[in-house]
Image: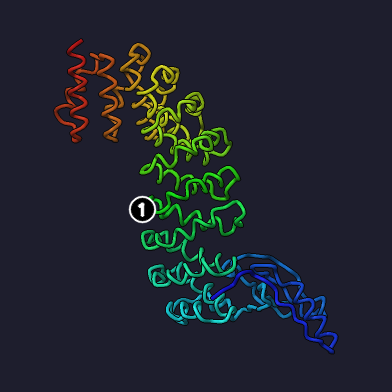
Amino acid sequence: MTENDDHTDSDSTDHTDRPFASGQQERNAHYPDRGYNLVEIDTMRPPGRALTLLGHSLKLSSITLPPATEFEDYVVYDADGHAYDHDDLGASSETTATSTVDELVDTIRTGERHAQRLALCRLVSVAADEPQACLDALPVLTTVLQETGLSMQAESLAVLSRLAEQYPESVSPAVGDVIRFLTPETPSEILVDAIGIVEAVSDSNPGAVVDSVPKLAALLQDGSPADGTALAAILHIAEVYPDSVVPITPQLVAYLDESRDEHRIGALAVLGTLSKSYPNVAEETIPTAIGLLQAEHDKVRANAAGLLADLASEYPDQIEPAIPRAIELLVDTDGHARYNATSILAHVAKVHPDSVEPAIEPLVGALDEEFAYTRGNACWALGYLQAADALERLQELERSDPNEEVRQAAAAAIAEIDRG
């Protein structure tokens, strides 16, 4: 099974029938250099003027033929001059009732090019409805990625992306071949699938895709069609292998100035994760993160507060200007923003209690938060602030809070206040 390039096989037959020759020439003109062209056939027009290009895709599975009418029909041509009609593509929407996965796999391995392409197209449909049934196709899908041209590889990636959503561990062995497609030169139509596969695998097995970090970073610089997904993959890797992500910090910092919230959210999350091990790599982002505490998007505010919380113990002086806004975030509509605000206040209160003293009343209110770690942070902050007015409520938490860490934090805060 080889296909070094999608190409057009020209028909050199000497046709003596002029209408037939005109029709063949017109068909040849509608064969794509690679992938598939959707073509309308006007049955009322003579050969040579009957075809109109309607669309192009690298994936046969992405094309839907419109219903035929009395005067129009539709066909798909590939780069080899093969045609795909309603019967061909209608069968692609059926599942294993007409073609078992084993039969499709056998066709992909041994069939002619036209049959191989149809089999891959049908496998995409099966994977969408019954992904588990397609797991046995993983070896041949990997072979397609290694040996064939771009249009068949695109179909293989489409199947793998569906499998990776449900069975990322099973797809892990193929991910090395997928990473090869993470380049700015890869058409966006299939780059999205490749990035999605890497992200899905990174969530369960980040070690399998740790080598993808430089490629993902290059895509961020180039304007990836799936920036959010690429950033999510980098985040999963950073949580386990921060050393591998530190070198791309400049690209992540640059994303904080992007206008799209999705970019900021992802970059803030990755920088916050890195700062837990390497706070110095994100130090320069502190002023920007403070500014983003005013963002309208909930997740931007929450992640900016999270980054500052991760940096606050190392750089309390630089984060002190964020205290007024952090106090306001104690009543934010987003629970993550409220939690991260209590963390900022607790860290800074340990060094600059006077700056955080205006937060005492809303911090007492935070002791009623549903999220246990928010209550715990509020306890620590109130202890550092010597907040005697909170003593009674802290004693209640020490006695009866359902979370052991909150009870311990309340006890530590009480001890701080008693030491006066």
Determine which quarter of the picture holds residue 343.
top left
Q: Position of residue 419 (x, y in %)?
A: 18, 12
Q: Position of residue 353 (x, y in %)?
A: 33, 13
Q: Is residue 235 left or right of residue 157?
A: left
**Residue named by callout 1:** 204
Q: Position of residue 244 (x, y in %)?
A: 43, 42
Which of 105 and 245 lies nearest the eye of the viewer? 245
Q: Is residue 98 visible?
A: yes
Q: Position of residue 238 (x, y in %)?
A: 40, 42
Figure colour scheme: rainbow
Q: Is residue 357 visible?
A: no
Label 1, secondary structure: give it. helix
Residue at point 55%, 44% (across, down): 220
Q: Is residue 325 left or right of residue 263?
A: left
Q: Indicate whether 406 appears above or below 160.
A: above
- Name the quarter where the C terminus is drawn: top left
Which of 41 and 201 lies nearest the eye of the viewer? 201
Determine which quarter of the picture holds residue 175.
bottom left
Total marks in image? 1
Q: Indicate whether 21 appears above or below 129.
A: below
Residue at point 33%, 15% (across, down): 351
Q: Amino acid at mark 1?
A: Ser
Determine which quarter of the picture holds residue 63.
bottom right
Which residue, as the protein is rendered here, is positioned at the far bottom? 16
Residue at point 29%, 25% (across, down): 378
Q: Is residue 387 left or right of residue 148?
A: left
